[in-house]
Amino acid sequence: MSNYSYNLDRSEIVFAKLYDINVSYRNLNAVCDAIRYLKATDAIEVLDNVISLEMPILFKRYNTHMGSRHELGGRKGKYPEKAAREVKKVLINAMANAGNKGLDAESMFIVHASSNKTHIEKRYPSKGSLSWGRGMYGRSSVNHSDIEYAKIEIGLSEESKKLSKNMSYFIKKNNRKAGDKNIKKDSKKQKPAPVKKAPKNQSEGLALPSVSTTAKAIEPKKEAVAKN
């Protein structure tokens, strides 16, 4: 097996990775933190929401001068679409690897999701820019922006006793929150129709005579009895 940064028992974990990605490793870290310890199907739903700009990703680090989002309760975040697409590719690859081993990938959880910087390549300016200041033509570049490549690692596992206590705790916690959100969405979509209450007795539907009319009907009878 190739080297992974996951250093615990790997016997029941299915891995997938992707090297040399031209994506910001900071965005990849935030996306990996958002899907870690989720069920694979729920994680794909989260990534699809980020790609379609429906739900931002929380940035706990590298959030200087970043705007706050009301979807995150006022915390800082943004929509790293490119990073979400690359993480989704690796996650689908890990699910395919689990299917090849005869496992149910949809019921597995993400126990390992990480991203790191692999190498940096210096972006050289043009020949004219290099020649400036040496008595030749051209202009020197003001900023030197290097190309940073990153890697993604994802590991899927079923909920078993071999997982650590922290993993089991966060799997139950995060998936309980995801289940509550799904229940709220279903309750908003399907609203029960109002039920009309039927009258308890048939006499409730009939109009009763008023008190004044009954009193008027009784008065003539009393006068007839008094004359007799």
Image: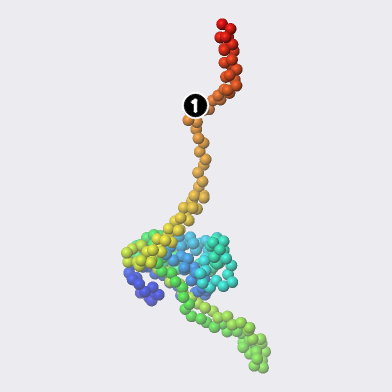
Residue at left 57%, top 73%? 64
Where residue 216 appears, as percent x and y from the top left, is 60, 17
Residue at left 48%, top 80%? 119
Q: In which quarter of the image is residue 74?
A: bottom right
Where residue 144 appears, as percent x and y from the top left, is 59, 82
Q: Which of 25 and 192 is in front in this view?
A: 192
Element on which disc 1 rests? helix
* Rendered view: 147 above or below 27: below
Q: In which quarter of the image is residue 176?
A: bottom left
Check the picture and name the quadrant holding the C terminus.
Answer: top right
Residue 109 appears in the figure:
no
* Rendered view: 132 above or below 112: below
Q: Residues within 10 Å of mark 1 (few under 14, many from 20)?
A: few
Number of numbered discs: 1
Q: Nearer the viewer, residue 150 or 172?
A: 172
Q: How is the image coloured?
A: rainbow
Check the picture and name the quadrant holding the N terminus.
Answer: bottom left
Q: What residue sits right under mark 1 in the picture?
A: 202
Where residue 135 appears, as percent x and y from the top left, is 67, 93
Residue at left 47%, top 62%? 44
Where residue 14 appears, as percent x and y from the top left, is 37, 68
* Rendered view: 206 above or below 114: above
